[in-house]
Image (cartoon, coloured by chain):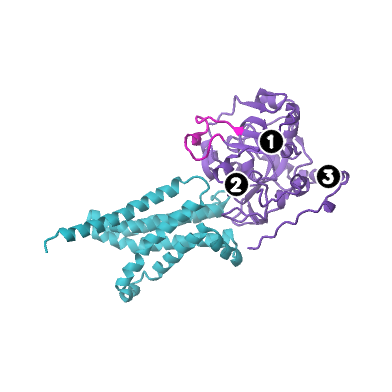
């Protein structure tokens, strides 16, 4: 049996654990006195975590040469979508209680909501085209489309940065992670170009 | 969203002072009657709550208390902001304040007053009768509690200090001691935390210096050993762990205003019609609750008592 067949269910369980913890907390009334805010924070954090994990797959593959790791990428991306849907629902239900007028106002008036919504729409498009059929029909365009995952990550970090009151410790960490992930990409592109230029004709 | 502008009050609409004072007496008397009726129902429950901290002796009930049922002790003490202990609202302040020692503690009275002084906390409190004040507490983050504070009217303290004619504001300062407040080692806020009130706000009968909660001394995370409580203002005005009161001529710069001038003002009066730039203040979560289960009231429901302090002021500008 290949290692990935063991690792994949373990990663699945790990990614599902935060959601399970929230369900457990709900039934044991252990989500602080302000459970709405707590769930919003948690689902937001885990959206970023799963999205970043999915973006880390390619670098891991390149550095380790372990090709099978690619089989985790879609699953992690879909977990990011799962958490962002919950995150959005906390905004719809806990913050606005289905008041459409307030929600529209929020999106247009408050920049951190605007960028958060943009990130959500990207993740929605990526989740909707994460199936085999889309990959086949979109061909090369699929890859370009799915590079938007980086844009979603960037918007997500900006969303976090703009919403904190004073403590930017966490947003700064995510930003640093993004710099590393994007930096590796850029580095590899540059290397590839120089290699192509110096290679014998 | 269309935000309705509060109409300016015409002078013809302003209640004559005599009537106004009578009305206040009436309100207080009826409040007292209600308190008497209401107390019996939750008195037993209240007595059962607490954190096992030392009890405060000889606490008098107050007609200025709300009749709303107080929030549970556990919630009040495990969900709050106290940046000196932890960033953000939650149980961080509780967890990180376990070893906090509030003794010995001195409070200094400085600036434009006749009776300057440096007091041991016990001596500072001793001349006054402790009162229980059950107040609504509204955080700027749109959550709220009902909190049974124990404290002394700030007006009494100020009268004893005898401010000079130059004293127009009072500035309060929190203890600066990174060995007791771990976050003061970081640059999270500009330390020490500072807050200020206009002298008439400070002298208002609702304004107290709290030293207790649920009949016991204040737990560290709620601002031990002495903190400000101004119930018609957002929580961040209610500065904790005070070591200095300074009477000054010019409006002091409070910490959150210094941090983000566009988001936090000097007055910070609870106002459902003036949004925080990043969220609405129209509603609030009376915790524990998942959703905003209450409309926020003007001046946190204390409009009758305090709106005259702000007559003629543009509250949208002076947020």
- The residues colored magenta run B173-192
Q: Alpha-carbon distance for marks 2 and 1? A: 18 Å
Residue A149: percent from left, percent from top: 37, 62
Labels 2 and 1: the sequence-earlier one: 1
Marks 3 & 2 on one chain: yes
Tell which subunit mark 2 falls on. Answer: B
Q: Which of the 4 image quadrants contains residue A201?
A: bottom left
Q: Which residue is mark 3?
A: B24
Tell which subunit mark 3 falls on. Answer: B
Q: Main secondary structure of the magenta part?
A: loop
Vertical comparison of B68 with A113: above or below: above
Q: Which chain is cyan?
A: A
Residue at the location (47% across, 51% down)? Answer: A161
Q: Is residue B213 magenta?
A: no
Q: Chain B colour?
A: purple
Labels 3 and 1: the sequence-earlier one: 3
Residue B264 badge: 2
Identity of the residue furthest to the bottom in this view: A137
Compare residues B112 and A129 and report the one nearer the observer: B112
Mark in front: 3 vs 1: 1
Mark in front: 3 vs 2: 2
């Amino acid at each position: 049996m290949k290692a990935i067949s063991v690792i994949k269910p373990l990663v699945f369980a790990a990614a599902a654990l935060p959601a399970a913890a929230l369900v457990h907390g709900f039934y044991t009334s252990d989500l602080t006195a302000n459970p709405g805010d707590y769930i919003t924070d948690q689902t937001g954090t885990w959206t970023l975590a799963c999205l970043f994990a999915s973006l880390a797959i390619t670098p891991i593959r390149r550095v380790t040469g372990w090709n099978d790791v690619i089989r985790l990428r879609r699953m992690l991306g879909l977990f990011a979508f799962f958490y962002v849907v919950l995150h959005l629902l906390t905004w719809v239900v806990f913050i606005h209680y289905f008041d459409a007028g307030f929600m529209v106002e929020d999106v247009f008036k408050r920049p951190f909501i605007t960028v958060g919504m943009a990130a959500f729409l990207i993740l929605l498009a990526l989740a909707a085209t994460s199936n085999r059929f889309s990959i086949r029909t979109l061909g090369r365009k699929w890859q370009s489309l799915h590079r938007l995952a980086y844009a979603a990550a960037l918007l997500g970090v900006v969303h976090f940065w703009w919403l904190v009151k004073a403590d930017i410790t966490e947003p700064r960490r995510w930003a640093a992670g993004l710099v590393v992930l994007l930096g590796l990409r850029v580095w590899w592109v540059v290397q590839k170009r120089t290699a192509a230029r110096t290679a014998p004709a | 969203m269309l935000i309705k502008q509060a109409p300016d009050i015409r002078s013809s609409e302003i209640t004559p002072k005599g009537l106004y004072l009578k009305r206040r007496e009436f309100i207080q008397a009826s409040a007292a009657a209600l308190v008497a009726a209401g107390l019996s129902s939750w008195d037993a429950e209240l007595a059962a709550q607490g954190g096992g901290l030392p009890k405060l002796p000889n606490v008098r009930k107050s007609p200025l208390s709300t009749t709303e049922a107080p929030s549970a002790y556990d919630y009040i003490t495990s969900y709050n902001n106290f940046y000196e202990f932890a960033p953000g609202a939650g149980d961080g302040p509780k967890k990180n304040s376990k070893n906090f020692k509030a003794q010995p503690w001195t409070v200094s009275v400085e600036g434009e007053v006749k009776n300057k002084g440096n007091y041991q906390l016990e001596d500072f409190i001793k001349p006054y009768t402790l009162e229980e004040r059950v107040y609504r507490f509204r955080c700027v983050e749109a959550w709220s509690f009902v909190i049974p504070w124990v404290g002394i009217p700030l007006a009494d303290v100020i009268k004893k200090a005898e401010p000079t004619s130059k004293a127009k504001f009072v500035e309060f300062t929190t203890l600066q001691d990174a060995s007791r407040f771990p976050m003061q080692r970081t640059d999270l806020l500009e330390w020490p935390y500072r807050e200020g009130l206009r002298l008439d706000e400070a002298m208002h009968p609702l304004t107290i210096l709290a030293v207790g909660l649920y009949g016991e001394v204040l737990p560290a995370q709620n601002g031990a050993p002495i903190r400000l409580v101004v119930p018609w203002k957002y929580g961040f005005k209610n500065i904790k762990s005070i070591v200095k009161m300074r009477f000054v001529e010019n409006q002091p710069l409070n910490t959150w205003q210094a941090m983000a001038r566009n988001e936090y003002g000097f007055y910070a009066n609870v106002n459902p019609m003036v949004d925080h730039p990043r969220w609405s203040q129209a509603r609030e979560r009376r915790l524990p609750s998942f959703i905003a289960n209450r409309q926020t009231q003007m001046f946190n429901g204390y409009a009758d008592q305090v709106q005259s302090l702000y007559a003629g002021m543009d509250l949208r500008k002076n947020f």
